[in-house]
Each structure stands twice: as structure tokens, then as C-alpha cells.
Image (cartoon, helix red, strand yellow):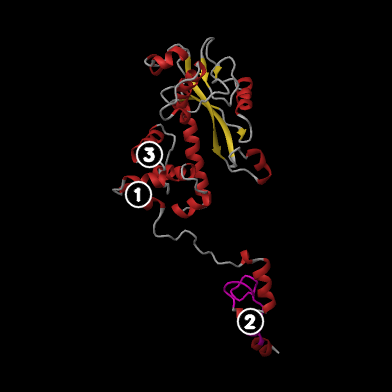
């Protein structure tokens, strides 16, 4: 009997393998020729993730850092702008401004440089690339692309107080004082205001509210700038379907940071806004936009024509 058990011992061991050994059914190390077809069909249909091999995704030879170096060293002036939507000098200045202020800190083991971070950010906001497009372009995971994008966004928001400056309410700009056509009408004007449609990605349930008059999904963002083209105010929170006048009314009544000018000073606005204190619009029912004044043989028919022409030329700084 003892010898019988000894003879059966190896056979018993071979048939009592634990579930984690290479011979387990359905595992990558098993012999699938011995596995029932019903089990293979169930595995592939119900739970393929449990048995899928770990195959690398980002295997391109041209990594993100190499691609940036390539377009930076090209001799064609437009190649860099066509990919980043910014000139090389402006791009270098932006990277230097963020890094010199410590807004984009990097450790010694960081795999993504500041230049690559800013480049993928500009690909998203300047070239309207999706983050999955940048994942393929820069050969990083989607999580890395998302995290680096928000790092640059936070850095730019931290630098916003330096970029968005306050107006000088007491001085008349030289563009007005040096031009008799402007000074006679707008000697107390301190800036121009207009709304701009910024493209937006929103859930399907909210798309009707964000669809603008041009048919695109956008936010209606009113902005103010001085006559040096420096932005002094930005109010971003309204849907693209909302009229300019309503957005302005909400800004002046709810935003404590709105830069109200002193009594007697005002901003230039177009016909889409309400014409009241602090905001001076054109005459309605009279030609206004600059293309209507181009060409010869179009003299001023009324004083309102003269005013609207000067108004459109000066307010056009915000367009």
C-alpha cells in the first residue's frame, strides 16, 4: 500500500495545481489548446481586462521634447507659429516669465520640461487640440497631459495681476489728445469695452445655453482695454447665448471688482450695449462699422454720421 501511494504521489501533485500556477485555465501562461472554447468566449466577451497583456501605448520615436526641439531649430519663421500659435520670441518670453517667478517649479527627476508644458498648453488653447491629441503628440499619458495643462493654467492665473492692469482715470490718452477728430467728442473717454465669444466645451445637456448667435458653443466674455491695448477687466462666466447688455448689467451689479470710472468719465461701447452713465455708445439707425466708411464719395450726411465714424475708429481698439 505504501508503494502504491508513492507511485500515485507525482500524479496527484500534477492534478492539484493551485489556481495561481502557470497551468491555471485562462491565464496568459496556460496552454489554451486544453481550455474549453466556451471559457475562452466568456473571457473575451465578459472580462477581457483581466487577461489582457500590458502593451505600451506611447511608442513613437519622436517624443514631445524632440518634437519641440525640432520646430524650435527650424529656419522657417512660420513653422513654429503654425504649431504653437505664437512666435518664438513671445514663446521664450512666456516660458521665462513663468519660470523666473517660480510658477512652474520642476524637480530634478521631472520628465516634462517647462518648455514642453507651455507648448502643450498652447496646443490646447491656441490650436484647439484635444488632450488626447496632445497625448499622441507629446507621448505622455492622458493624466500627465491633463495635470501639466492645469499647472500652466494655474501659473498664468497667478500672474494675472501683472497682466491685467488698472486704468489711469485722470489722464486723457495721447491717442485722443493728439487727434482733433477724437478730442472734440471723447476727451473724457478712458477705454473701450466689448464682448467676445470664447469657444467652450460643455456637456450635451448645456449646449443650447452656450450656443451663440454664430452657431458655435462659446462663452460671452466682456472685456475692457485701454488705448494701448492693455486689458484692464475680464468677466468670464456667462453663456454664449446671453446678450451683451445683460452680461454687462450683471457685471456692474454683482462684481465688486468692476472698474467704475469717476463721474464724467466713460467707456466706449458698441450698439449691443445699453447707452447710460459710464458707457457711451453710438447713435442708432446711423451707419457705424468701419467697412461702411471705406471708399470715396461717402461724405458725412449728418453730425451723427461724423460722431459714429469717430466712435467706431476709436472703439475698434477692442475688436
Pointer 3 residue: 91
Pointer 2 residue: 34
- Give SS at disc 1: helix
Residue drawn at x 60%, y 24% as measured from the top left? 248
- Give SS at disc 2: helix
Is 267 included in the stretch rendered in magenta?
no
Please tell me which residue lies in front, 290 or 114: 290
Residue lying furthest left in this view?
Answer: 75
Residue 274 vertical position relative to residue 100 in the rendered view, above or below: above
Measured as percent of width and height from the top left, residue 33 is found at: 61, 81
Per the model, the C-alpha gap separating discs 1 and 2 is 54 Å
Per the model, the C-alpha gap separating discs 1 and 3 is 12 Å
Foreground tag (2 vs 3)? 3
Residue drawn at x 47%, y 34% as measured from the top left? 156
Foreground tag (1 vs 2)? 1
Asked if marks 1 and 2 touch (Cβ < 8 Å), the reply is: no
Can residue 319 be seen at all in this image of the molecule? no
Number of residues whose C-alpha sits closer than 10 Å to that of mark 2, classed few (under 14), some (14–19) or many (20 or more): few
Please tell me which residue lies in front, 199 or 244: 244
- Give SS at disc 3: helix
Pointer 1 residue: 71
Tell me which label, 1 or 2, sits earlier in the chain: 2
Number of residues whose C-alpha sits closer than 10 Å to that of mark 1, classed few (under 14), some (14–19) or many (20 or more): some
Residue 125 vertical position relative to residue 194 in the rendered view, above or below: below
Tell me which label, 2 or 3, sits earlier in the chain: 2
Amino acid at each position: 500500500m505504501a508503494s502504491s501511494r508513492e507511485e500515485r504521489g507525482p500524479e496527484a501533485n500534477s492534478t492539484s495545481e493551485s489556481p495561481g500556477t502557470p497551468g491555471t485555465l485562462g491565464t496568459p501562461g496556460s496552454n489554451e489548446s486544453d481550455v474549453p472554447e466556451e471559457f475562452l468566449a466568456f473571457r473575451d466577451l465578459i472580462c477581457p481586462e483581466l487577461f489582457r497583456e500590458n502593451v505600451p501605448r506611447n511608442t513613437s520615436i519622436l517624443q514631445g521634447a524632440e518634437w519641440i526641439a525640432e520646430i524650435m531649430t527650424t529656419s522657417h519663421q512660420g513653422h513654429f507659429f503654425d504649431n504653437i500659435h505664437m512666435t518664438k520670441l513671445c514663446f521664450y518670453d512666456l516660458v521665462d516669465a513663468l519660470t523666473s517667478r517660480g510658477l512652474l517649479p520642476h524637480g530634478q527627476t521631472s520628465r516634462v520640461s517647462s518648455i514642453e508644458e507651455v507648448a502643450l498648453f498652447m496646443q490646447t488653447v491656441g490650436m484647439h487640440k484635444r488632450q488626447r491629441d496632445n497625448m499622441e503628440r507629446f507621448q505622455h499619458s492622458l493624466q500627465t497631459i491633463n495635470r501639466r495643462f492645469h499647472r500652466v493654467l494655474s501659473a498664468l492665473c497667478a500672474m494675472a495681476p501683472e497682466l491685467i492692469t488698472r486704468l489711469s482715470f485722470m489722464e486723457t490718452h495721447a491717442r485722443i489728445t493728439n487727434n482733433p477728430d477724437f478730442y472734440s467728442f471723447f476727451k473724457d473717454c478712458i477705454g473701450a469695452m466689448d464682448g467676445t465669444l470664447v469657444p467652450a466645451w460643455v456637456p450635451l445637456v448645456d449646449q443650447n445655453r452656450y450656443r451663440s448667435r454664430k452657431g458655435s458653443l462659446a462663452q460671452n466674455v466682456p472685456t475692457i482695454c485701454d488705448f494701448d491695448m492693455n486689458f484692464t477687466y475680464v468677466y468670464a462666466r456667462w453663456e454664449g447665448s446671453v446678450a451683451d447688455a445683460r452680461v454687462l448689467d450683471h457685471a456692474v451689479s454683482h462684481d465688486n471688482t468692476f472698474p467704475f470710472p469717476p463721474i464724467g468719465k466713460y467707456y466706449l461701447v458698441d450698439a449691443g450695449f445699453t447707452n447710460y452713465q459710464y458707457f457711451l455708445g453710438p447713435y442708432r439707425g446711423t451707419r457705424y462699422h468701419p467697412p461702411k466708411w471705406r471708399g470715396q464719395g461717402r461724405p458725412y450726411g449728418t453730425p451723427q454720421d461724423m460722431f459714429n465714424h469717430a466712435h467706431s475708429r476709436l472703439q475698434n481698439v477692442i475688436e
